[in-house]
Image: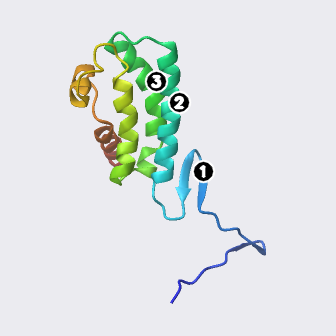
Amino acid sequence: MSPKKNEYKLNGNVLQKVDEEKDLGIFVTSDLKPSVHCVNAAAKAMQVLGVIKRNFVLTDEEDFRLLFNGFVRPHLEYCVSVWSPYLKKDIECLEKVQRRATKLVKGLRSKSYRDRLCLLSITSHYITLHCITLLHMYNV
């Protein structure tokens, strides 16, 4: 038995079925999984990271924090409480951006990811996402 396909109308016109739609900068798919948005957010953040890499020499942690928090993180965290990633592959996709970004600071490239996070005094992106979601829930 196949699922019943509903036909929706607006002012007598049949609405077209789409698999994904971008609304207010967030990609919403028909299955409501955040994977498409995670991939697009990570790609945009990687583009910005590439611009930073080509134009800046990051010699200290403060420069990194200013550039990363000001230009890269907003792409990864925009409306995160709405599209909150819960699949492991989506979280890893976003975390990969931060992994790559922490390697830009001189002297940290050879260290492990955890060591780089400690030395830069930043948290894992996964933990940051949960803190933002909890903060939004508390404010509601």
- Frontmost of labels 2 and 3 is 2
Q: Give x and y (percent) for residue 124.
A: 28, 35
Q: Residue drawn at (49%, 41%), measured in percent from left and top? A: 41
Whether residue 140 appears in this view of the structure is no
Q: Secondary structure at mark 3?
A: helix
**In front: 82, or 119?**
119
| N-term-proximal mark, 1 vs 3 | 1
Q: Position of residue 93 (x, y in %)?
A: 40, 43
x 33%, y 51%: residue? 88
Q: Are marks 2 and 1 in contact (CB under 8 Å)?
A: no
Q: Is residue 97 above or below residue 33?
A: above
| Residue 67 percent location from the top left of the image | 44, 20
Q: Earlier in the sequence, mark 2 or mark 1?
A: 1
Give neighbour class at mark 1: few <14, some 14-19, many 20+ (Cα, 10 Å).
few
Q: Which residue is mark 3?
A: 70
Of residues 33 and 55, the one nearer the viewer is 55
Q: Is residue 58 above or below residue 15?
A: above
Measured as percent of width and height from the top left, residue 21 is found at 61, 55
> What residue appears at the point 47 percent right and 39 percent down from the top-left corner?
42
Which amino acid type corresponds to the residue marked 1 in the rendered image? Asp
Distance CA(mark 2)–CA(mark 1): 21 Å
Q: Amino acid at mark 2?
A: Gln
User: 32 and 9: which one is in front?
Assistant: 32
Callout 2: few (<14), some (14-19), or many (20+) C-alpha neighbours within 10 Å? few
Q: What is the crowding at mark 3: few (fewer than 14 residues within 10 Å), some, or many (at least 20)?
A: few
Residue corresponding to mark 2: 47
Q: Do residues under tags 1 and 3 come within 8 Å of each other at their CB atoms?
A: no
Q: Secondary structure at mark 1?
A: strand
Q: Which mark is residue 92?
A: none
Tell which tag, 2 or 1, sits nearer the viewer.
2
The residue at the far bottom in this view is 1
Residue bearing mark 1: 23
